[in-house]
Amino acid sequence: MDSSAACLSESVIFKGLDAQDIDGLLPLFSRWTVMPGEILARASHCAQFFFLLEEGALLVAMEEGRAVVLNRPGDFAGLSMVSLNGINTATITVLEKGVVWAVPCRDILDLTGHATQLAATIMDRWQQYCKEKAPFCSNLAETGVI
Amino acid sequence: MNGVDAVGVLYGLEAINAHNGWAISVVGVTIVFSGLVTLSALISQLHKLVTLYDNPEIIKKLFTRKSESAAKAGTPKKHMVLTEAQKQICRQYNLLAQTMDAVISLPKLLRMAELSGLKDPHANINLLIKSGILCADEQGYFTWDEDIFIRTTS
């Protein structure tokens, strides 16, 4: 699990959290090795997982032909970027062989749904990350899953 | 005479007029108000100093960004060195991209590559992005950088 801790600490969203918070998050993530062409999430399907990129590249294909390519370690394909109300709004395809850390959507949404300092920090950083990566994304205010 | 006693000492408004009192008042008021405005501006920016004190890494990031942008401005854009096979792939995708608008939808390009029977479309699109030939804009679309394409494939 060392590399997941490293990946979390590199992520813009989870970086700088307390060691205790990181330790609480680590068990939620599972490591997947992914190959080019693999589809991790399909638009209009039920949202099951969010993905934290350790290595490789992901194509997040959204509505109207728009897309974002995530290729930095620590990039996060999740929350309002890929889902809304429990349904995927984007298709996530692997462009380059790599490693992702998959986390069940429900776990992240339970975490961010509470009125805690941790949730506020994560959501604040999520907003900044989304503005940088996908400024055209209109549903930034949504958390992604009910 | 009004404002002047028997000895010739001035009083009241005449005294003010005679000794540049109005000018002195204006200067005094200006100095006081300038000081107040400066002080209020300083106080309004204090929260930034507190943020810097709480997060000193912001200062490091600021200097890193400045030196990176200075370096980028100074040095010409380096292009990736491709193998002959990779150059050929780029030329194939150039033909595909020419059939699309100036702004390219990456999922659409990927779909067209698959339909055209091009090998390893995902890996090759990743190559185009890494080499800088395909660049993302802020609207979720991509553009084909002809300049980089020519330099990379020549």
Image (cartoon, coloured by chain):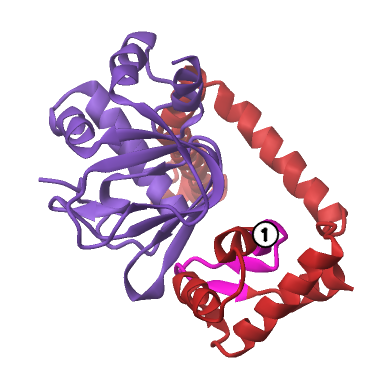
Chain colours: A purple, B red
User: Percent from the top left, x then y, of residue B14?
Assistant: 46, 50
Q: Is residue B133 magenta?
A: yes
Q: Nearer the viewer, residue B61 or A8?
A: A8
The residue that mark 1 highlights is: B127
The residue at the point 72 percent across, 71 percent down is B89
Q: Nearer the viewer, residue A99 or B147?
A: A99
In the image, farthest residue toward the top: A20
The residue at the point 51 percent across, 47 percent down is A35
* On-image quarter of the N terminus of chain A: top left
User: Percent from the top left, x then y, of residue A77?
Assistant: 38, 46
User: Percent from the top left, x then y, of residue A112?
Assistant: 20, 32
* On-image quarter of the C terminus of chain A: top left
In the image, farthest residue toward the bottom: B99
Above-or-below relation of B77 to B60: below
Above-or-below relation of A37 to A108: below
Q: Amino acid at mark 1?
A: Leu
The residue at the point 67 percent across, 40 percent down is B65
The residue at the point 62 percent across, 32 percent down is B61
Query: Circle 1 — which element?
Result: helix
Q: Is residue A71 left or right of residue B90?
A: left
Would residue A57 be visible to someone looking at this image?
Answer: yes
The segment highlighted magenta reads B128-143
Q: Is residue B90 left or right of residue B100?
A: right
In the rendered structure, the residue with mark 1 lies on which chain? B
